[in-house]
Amino acid sequence: MSKLDKRDEIARAALELIAGHGFHGAPMAMIADRAGVGAGTIYRYFENKDVLINELYRDLEERIYPTILDGYVPEKPIRERFLHLGAALLRYFIGNPLDFRYLEQFHNSPYGVEYRRDKILGENEGCDVFRELFEEGITQQVMKEFPLVILFALSFGPLLAVARDHILGFITLEEMLIAQTVEACWDAIHK
Amino acid sequence: MSKLDKRDEIARAALELIAGHGFHGAPMAMIADRAGVGAGTIYRYFENKDVLINELYRDLEERIYPTILDGYVPEKPIRERFLHLGAALLRYFIGNPLDFRYLEQFHNSPYGVEYRRDKILGENEGCDVFRELFEEGITQQVMKEFPLVILFALSFGPLLAVARDHILGFITLEEMLIAQTVEACWDAIHK
DNA sequence: CTAAACGGAATGAACGTTCATTCCTATTTG
DNA sequence: CAAATAGGAATGAACGTTCATTCCGTTTAG
């Protein structure tokens, strides 16, 4: 197994276990077992568990962005772009439940709170597509004049909630329902 | 200190610590310290930590319900009732950040998932006000014909998200913004 | 005086991390 | 070309710490 493969094996094992059982339900020894490496080997690739957890999140972000930006046309009307992004995000979550569960674990932990604090209060460079879309929506008077965080809440709040419900098996989201849900989110934010 | 007082002290201490640092950042010894009791004493009131965590959640539910139902008039139009419940809930969260943080910790943990599974798949007897409101809204054709879980997601998703943003200090929700946010949620679900 | 309540030290399981050792591959040497 | 050597990668037992829970001597209440 090459060096990169091994890093990937460890990352995959950690993602699976953490997504399934949370940070505290995924001891390093268990991650090592599932990755097929020795416990100490993990520390050749990740300085410690905190670093591992944060790097997994960066990896995940880098997988999501290209996916939802695929087919995104900045010239189209705002509504259409919003519907595209929302549906693409929802589809990604449904198609990659482990990524979604990990994302949720991360967000609802001190890691995620600190991360978000940096993003929102610092010079935010991430979530640019959504940010730009919302800012454009406000200046063009097609969206309600809410602070950005509220527009985020009105959009992502429901999307994350329905993704969670789908993945936990409380509902089955097929393509029609996805579109309708994202449209309902649009109803919440548009003027 | 009376027996009931002591139970309450333990519950309060546990709520504070868990709300602030999560389940794993609130060891029993620390809870005992803050409650001003011995570590062993906790086990006279709660069988173990799991039971403590679950009972805290039941206590919390019983505090929330009366609060948001205060001033709720079942005879009023659906929209008005929804706005009342949404705003009352948001106000409760903002006014009781510890309760809110605890609720979030609980929901995003195996405890909460299991709890929700029972609620949704079993013969649901909780969240009755909201459930009835949504069912009435659908039959009266004032709400979109979505499955209940989606209506819940469209309503609570944003509310929980903005409450979190307020409590973490990312935004300041004053009365005007609360009303506008809940109205935006209504826009998402009404026909 | 007795029985229940209490406190906090003791216990053992579980965890993240370390490190002395082994393994593997590539390079050097004869 | 084969054998010897070197050195980074990998290993997993061991360590120190933390935690939930138990245990038992002490205090309190009736």
Image: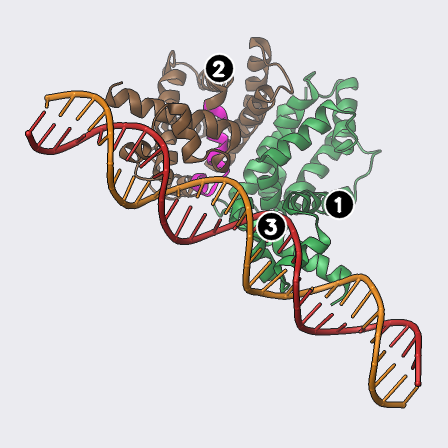
Chain colours: A green, B brown, C red, D orange
The residue marked by circle 2 belongs to what chain? B
Instruction: Tell me which residue sits at (35%, 18%) in the image.
Output: B66
What are the residue bounds of the magenta stretch?
Answer: B99-113
Where, by quadrant of the figure, is residue B168 drawn? top right
| The N terminus of chain A sits in image quarter | bottom right
User: The residue tagged with tag 1: helix, strand or loop?
Assistant: helix
Q: Amino acid at mark 3?
A: Leu
Q: Position of residue B50 (x, y in %)?
A: 38, 40
Spatial CA span between label 3 and label 2: 35 Å
Name the chain letter of the residue that bears numbered label 1: A
Report the magenta stretch's main SS.
helix
Where residue A167 sits in the image (x, y, percent)? 54, 47
Q: Amino acid at mark 2?
A: Gly
Q: The C terminus of chain A lies in which quarter of the figure?
A: top right
Q: Position of residue B142 (x, y in %)?
A: 49, 24
Judge from the rendering whether residue B92 lies leftward or rightward of residue A126; answer left or right. left
Q: Answer with left or right where residue B105 lies relative to residue A126.
A: left
Q: Is residue B37 visible?
A: yes
Relative vertical location of residue B91 with respect to residue B20 in this rendering, above or below: above
Can residue B136 be seen by looking at this rendering? no
The amino acid pointed to by label 1 is Glu
Residue A71 point in image, percent of width and height:
79, 44
- The residue that disc 3 covers is A98
Find numbered disc 3 in the image and state the secondary structure of the residue it sits on: helix
- The dot on residue A147 is none
The residue labelled by disc 1 is A62
The answer for how far apart the CA atoms under marks 3 and 1 are is 15 Å
Which mark is drawn over residue B95?
2
